[in-house]
């Protein structure tokens, strides 16, 4: 398939700048692939589609406050620094994006905090906006990490034009977030409330937790018409033995196995055995899923409404069927569903 087949007009007013007041009261569009039907529900109605022994696979990554602002040595210019990943904890080396990039060269120093207690030196260029920084800080590694959290802010997606609010720190984190390392939330999981999780648990639905630390690569635009030529950035994943046992048992018993989000789908599809079972794994994945694709583990999924031409839309389209997905998106726009991170959700059965 070609890039242009994933394009559509998205009215600006459908971009969600705020989440629903209650997490589980976002709207839910339910797609039944077999019957080719579309239903309109609330997210908390999700429970009606699952039974005892079914499994929900969750991404328990935790977003860290990756966006920081520093001042350039001598000129005092304000520079945005977006922490992407730690390269070396001993030498405090980080892979970052800087904005405006044209002002930041190798050898420049940046000062953070009113007391300038944290300093970073630019030691390499990686991409047009990418730099490698060495942080200089008097204190232990734990104190250094604490300082990063203190100075950083929740990295809301660029399309949200408003200022970050203190509530975003909690809003932009799933309630099952545990392992810090993502620069963006696995957004399908944002719809789950403690109350809904409890109700699912009481009903006998099992949860299998795994980790994919979401990087900015997930949101990189696809710039080639031939999708087979697009390269995904690598992201770190962990699939523990406990998750494999839960999932593989559900496969044996022919239960529903639901991937909560595109990140979970990419994680499990990155570690499948020859006989279609989930394998324990710790490492990196640059899996890019687009139509046509045969899925091995999940037989249903929860996802948000995604951007035109995005890798996320391509994966969901591969899962639901391209024509059915585009029909559903057309209906979502007509029915004024909200798109993106804080938007509404979709359940594909």
Image: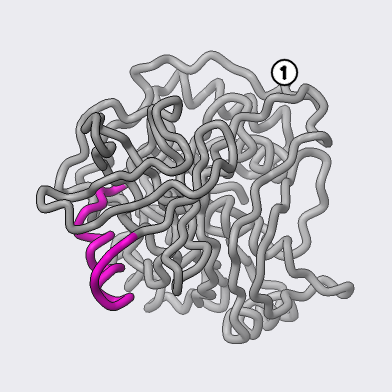
Residue 209's place in the image compared with 129, above or below, is below
Query: Can the viewer see residue 338 in this picture?
Result: no
Mark 1: few/some/many CA within 10 Å (<14, 14-19, 20+): few
Image quadrant where residue 143 sits:
bottom left
Q: Would you say residue 140 sits in the magenta stretch? A: yes
Residue 293: image x %, image y %? 81, 47
Residue at image location 53% in from the left, 29% down from the top: 307
Q: Which secondary structure, mark 1?
A: helix
The stretch of residues the image draws in magenta is 136-154
Please report the residue visible at 70 percent of the width from the left and 45 percent of the height from the top: 319
Give x and y (percent) for residue 310.
60, 32
Residue 304 visible to an observer of this rendering: yes
Q: Does 80 lie within the magenta span?
A: no
Please give the name of the residue rendered at 28% of the width and 68% of the height, measured from the top-left corner. Answer: 144
| Count of marks placed on residues | 1
Image spot of residue 39 (x, y percent):
50, 38
Q: Return the residue at label 1.
A: 4
Where residue 77 sits in the image (x, y, percent)?
25, 29
Q: Is residue 45 left or right of residue 124?
A: left
């Amino acid at each position: 398939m070609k890039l242009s087949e994933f394009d559509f007009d998205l009215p600006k007013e459908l971009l969600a700048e705020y989440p629903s007041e209650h997490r589980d009261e976002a709207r839910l569009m339910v797609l039944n692939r077999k019957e080719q039907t579309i239903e309109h529900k609330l997210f908390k109605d999700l429970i009606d589609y699952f039974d005892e022994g079914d499994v929900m696979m969750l991404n328990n990554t935790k977003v860290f406050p990756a966006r920081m602002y520093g001042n350039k040595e001598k000129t005092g210019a304000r520079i945005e620094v977006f922490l992407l990943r730690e390269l070396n904890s001993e030498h405090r080396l980080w892979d970052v994006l800087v904005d405006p990039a044209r002002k930041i060269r190798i050898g420049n120093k940046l000062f953070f905090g009113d007391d300038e207690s944290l300093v970073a030196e630019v030691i390499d260029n990686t991409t047009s906006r990418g730099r490698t920084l060495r942080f200089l800080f008097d204190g232990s590694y734990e104190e250094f990490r604490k300082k990063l959290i203190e100075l950083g802010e929740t990295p809301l997606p660029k399309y949200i034009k408003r200022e970050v609010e203190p509530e975003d720190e909690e809003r932009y984190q799933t309630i099952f977030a545990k392992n810090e390392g993502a620069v963006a939330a696995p957004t399908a999981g944002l719809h789950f409330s403690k109350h809904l999780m409890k109700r699912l648990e009481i009903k006998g639905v099992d949860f299998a937790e795994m980790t994919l630390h979401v990087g900015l690569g997930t949101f990189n635009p696809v710039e080639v018409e031939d999708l087979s030529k697009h390269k995904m950035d690598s992201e770190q994943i962990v699939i523990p033995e406990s998750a494999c046992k839960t999932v593989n048992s559900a496969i044996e018993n022919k239960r529903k196995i639901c991937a909560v989000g595109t990140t979970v789908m990419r994680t499990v599809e990155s570690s499948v055995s020859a006989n279609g079972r989930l394998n324990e794994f710790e490492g990196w994945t640059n899996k890019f899923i687009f139509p046509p694709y045969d899925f091995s583990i999940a037989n249903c999924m929860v996802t948000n409404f995604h951007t035109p031409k995005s890798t996320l839309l391509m994966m969901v389209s591969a899962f639901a069927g391209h024509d059915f997905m585009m029909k559903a998106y057309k209906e979502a726009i007509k029915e004024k569903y909200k798109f993106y991170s804080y938007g509404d959700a979709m359940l594909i059965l």
